[in-house]
Amino acid sequence: MGLKTWFYRGGRPNRVARVLDRATAALYGRGIAPDRLVQLEVPGRRSGRTVAVPLVMAVVENERYLVAMLGERANWVRNVRAAAGDVTIRHGRREDVHLDEVAPADRARVLKAYLRRAPNARAHLPVDKDAPIAEFERVAPAYPVFRVRSRHVAAEDPRP
């Protein structure tokens, strides 16, 4: 087992990973990283306190996406769903956004783009970054993907 999988054994961050994630989220939020690295702020579904998570943003056809490399059980995914998709993304500045969950049938191309941008995620997704799109389609149902839209655009745009 590699170090990257040890941090998230069982799909949950261990104590060391939680500390590192907090520090990484703070750096991403301040904009001290490439622009693809962001801090997601979402209210905790039980506590209501803001939870900050470091994530890698994928871009496909000028649309921004967030991917749950740990799959359905990722805490931030459950919090986003409980918040009805209304969250904040930070990278040097705050942006109130709405996250629309992408249907499993439409996730493959985003997952492929994500693996190219997020080398650390390769330990968690059971597909090679250069695999054919059919391999990504096979695993897509297990990895939630969310399209990022500015809240004012989300309110005007009738697309699901």
Image (tube, helix red, strand yellow):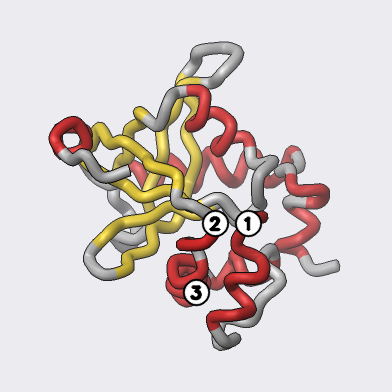
**Foreground label between 1 and 3:** 1
- Tag 3 or tag 2, which sits nearer the N-term? 2
- The residue carrying mark 2 is 104
| Disc 2 + disc 1, Cβ < 8 Å | yes
Residue 35 appears in the rendering = yes
Q: CA distance from mark 1 to mark 3?
A: 14 Å
> Is residue 117 placed above or below 25 in the rendered structure?
below
> Above or below — where is 131 with respect to 11?
below
Please name the residue that numbered disc 3 is placed on. Answer: 112
Side (left or right) of 22 relative to 65: right
The Cα atoms of the two marked residues, 2 and 1, are separated by 5 Å
Of 88 and 60, the residue lying toward us? 60
Task: Please state which amino acid type lies under the numbered disc 3.
Answer: Lys
Kind of residue indicated by mark 2: Pro
Disc on the earlier residue, 2 or 1 = 2
For label 1, the residue is 141
Please identify the quadrant where the C terminus is shown: top left
Residue 153, quarter of the rendered image: top left
As shown in the figure, which amino acid type bears the numbered disc 1? Pro
User: Residue drawn 75% across and 48% down?
Assistant: 11
Counting residues from the start of the chain, the first of labels 1 and 3 encountered is 3
Query: What residue appears at the point 40 percent right and 32 percent down from the top-left corner?
Result: 85
Residue neighbourhood size for the residue with mark 2, other residues' Cα within 10 Å, grouped as few (<14), some (14–19), many (≥20): some
Closer to viewer: mark 2 or mark 3 = 2
User: At 45% across and 23% down in the image, what residue appears?
Assistant: 83
Q: Position of residue 91 (x, y in %)?
A: 28, 47
Q: Secondary structure at mark 2?
A: helix
- Residue 67 location in percent, x, y? 50, 54
**Mark 3 Cα shell of 10 Å, populated few (<14), some (14-19), many (≥20):** many
